[in-house]
Amino acid sequence: MATTTLMKENKASSNVRSGAVTMTVPESTSEKPLKSENVILKTNSLRVFYGNHLAIKNVSASFMENRVTALIGPSGCGKSTYLRSLNRMNDEIPGCRIEGEILYRGIDLNHPQANVFDIRKRIGMVFQRPNPFAKSIFENVAFGSKHHGVKNKQLLEEIVEKSLRKAALWDEVKDRLHRSALALSGGQQQRLCIARALAMEPDVLLLDEPASALDPVSTGKVEELIQELKKDYTVIIVTHNMQQAARISDYTAFFYMGELVEFGETTELFTNPKKKQTEDYITGNFG
């Protein structure tokens, strides 16, 4: 994958040496320190405001490369707001303001000169409800590549096939690539949206409750897919389903009232939580 500075013009020259992105050594908020050489994305004292309302309160967290991290917590606790901050998606919300650092391979994505388009190439996102374009399956997956200047038909075909295979959808749609994506089932549409994100060759994939609108069979397929994807990508997923978090994640972060209460290895957090709030939440004694 080609290296990008993620910064406009030459403003980030201090972050780049000989064409390679430098990596800062992050610290972890987990009780058991993460291996710093494997941290790909982190936030330092991240605060998110909607107008005067402080929605995310000084959250510092580190995300391991090629691992799945689940963000859990009650509705309205800030987990989706935090997730959307990681690729600057909250920029689209009027009145939203972000303070603190978002470091991807040592580059602060919250810097005024950060290139948002490049950020979203490297840190892709899939939303809660499937949102395919009213175009063919092929055009959905090829959309981003075309937008970034890829015109060669053979190359586009290779990108589409590769992305659909990675999303475990190729065998189901290879004979109807030029039919409307809207004719697919809900589960297939969600995997198509994942394929569309993968076509941009991201390092990190953000998933905002990707199975909440799906039936159990489709949910199972998405969970199996996530386990496969972590071989090549770092996955951060918001889920309201604690059983799902326990099944698919390597690390779990528990949010409450805009604060990161606890962050650690999933097995340990669910079996031996360090904070009473966490224990109350996972045992159903919360609220």
Image (cartoon, rainbow, N blue to C red):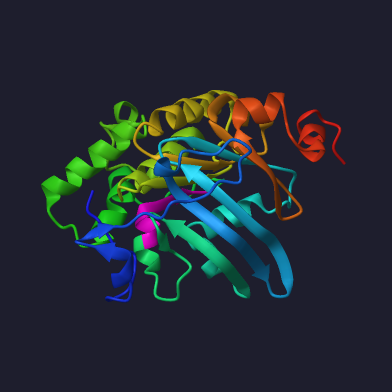
Along the viewing direction, whichever of 287 and 250 lies nearer the viewer: 250
Along the viewing direction, whichever of 269 and 80 lies nearer the viewer: 269
> From the viewer's perspective, is 8 left or right of 77?
left
Along the viewing direction, whichever of 8 and 33 lies nearer the viewer: 33
> From the viewer's perspective, is 257 left or right of 39?
right
Residue shown at the point (28%, 76%) measured from the top left: 9
> From the viewer's perspective, is 133 left or right of 53?
left
Placement of 49 over or under 180, stated as above or below:
below
Q: Position of residue 260 (x, y in %)?
A: 68, 49
Q: Is residue 176 visible?
A: yes
Q: Position of residue 208 (x, y in %)?
A: 56, 46
The quarter in which the C terminus is drawn is top right
Placement of 49 over or under 166, stated as above or below:
below
Q: Position of residue 113 (x, y in %)?
A: 39, 75
Residue shown at the point (14%, 47%) measured from the top left: 155
Q: Is residue 243 visible?
A: no
Residue shown at the point (46%, 25%) measured from the top left: 224
| Magenta region | 119-127
Q: Position of residue 82 (x, y in %)?
A: 60, 55
Placement of 91 over or under 24, stated as above or below:
below
